Amino acid sequence: MKKIYPNLYYKKVEEITIETLLKNKIKLLILDVDNTLIDYYKNLSEEVKQWAKEMKGQGIKLYILSNTNNKEKVETVAKTLQIPYKHLAMKPLKRGFKYIQKETKIKPENIAVVGDQIFTDVLGGNRSNMFTILVDPIDEKKDYWYTAWKRPIENKIKNTFKAKEEKNKDVY
């Protein structure tokens, strides 16, 4: 059951700070594309571009890992952000995560997986012994059919996680 809970949760990718990554000894972010970096219409915001530039400027490596079969879409985002990518990942299978880990020679405990889906990004990252960060989808109303049916289940899990986080904050 623990495999479906992220280590951290943010509303959007741009809220992830260098301080949080350094505190958790993260050297590499594996990023999902659809509804994490870009919206349904394939728009990459200026805020995400600036955030990626700042992360790279602080020495954090970025790598895209996407389940999409649309190589051109992923390649366009990767070229814009000037980062490597792998598509057809088949998340939550470990294959894509392990490929990136071997390519970058960074230990799993120094890698964070960032995405908007619990059953692909978070589960795959946790199964690969990586740190996981869940973000809200950019536009949940525009989900693809194969994602939309999972959202109510994911929202219940996310709300449970957020409630636990709030409870833990009160302890300190």
Image (tube, rainbow, N blue to C red):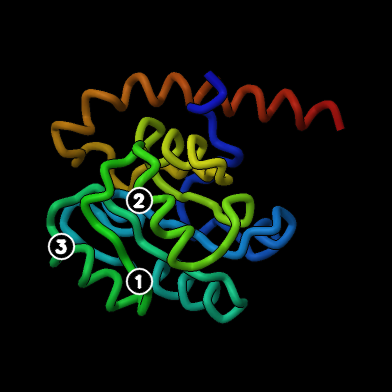
Q: Secondary structure at mark 1?
A: loop
Q: Nearer the viewer, residue 15 or 64?
A: 64
Instruction: Identify the residue under disc 3.
Output: 71
Would you identify the image quadrant in which residue 80 lies?
A: bottom left
Give the amino acid at mark 2: Gly
Callout 3 environment at 10 Å: few (<14), some (14 to 19), or many (20+)? some
- Kindly report which numbered mark, 2 or 3, lies closer to the viewer in this rendering: 2
Question: Which callout, 2 or 3, points at the residue further toward the start of the chain?
Answer: 3
The residue at which mark 2 appears reads as 96
Q: Amino acid at mark 1?
A: Pro
Secondary structure under tag 2 reads helix
- Of the two numbered discs 1 and 2 in the rendering, the one whose residue sits closer to the viewer: 2
Q: Quadrant of the C terminus?
A: top right
30 to 141, vertically: above or below: below
User: For the residue marked with disc 3, what is the amino acid?
Assistant: Lys
In space, the residues marked 2 and 3 are separated at their CA atoms by 15 Å
Which residue corresponds to the image point at 44% horizontal and 57% vertical from the top-left? Answer: 30
Q: Residues within 10 Å of mark 1 (few under 14, many from 20)?
A: some
Q: Which mark is residue 84?
A: 1
Query: Residue 123, position in %: x, y?
Result: 44, 33
Of mark 1 and mark 2, the one earlier in the sequence is 1
Quarter residue 93 falls in: top left
Q: Earlier in the sequence, mark 1 or mark 3?
A: 3
Q: Residue at x 32, y 21 (%)?
A: 152
Residue 79, position as x, y percentages in the image: 28, 77
Query: Residue 157 placed where, x, y %?
Result: 47, 22
| Number of the label disc, if any, that sits on residue 100 | none
The structure residue drawn at horizontal position 53% and vertical position 66%, both measured from the top left corner, is 105
- 156 to the left or right of 146: right
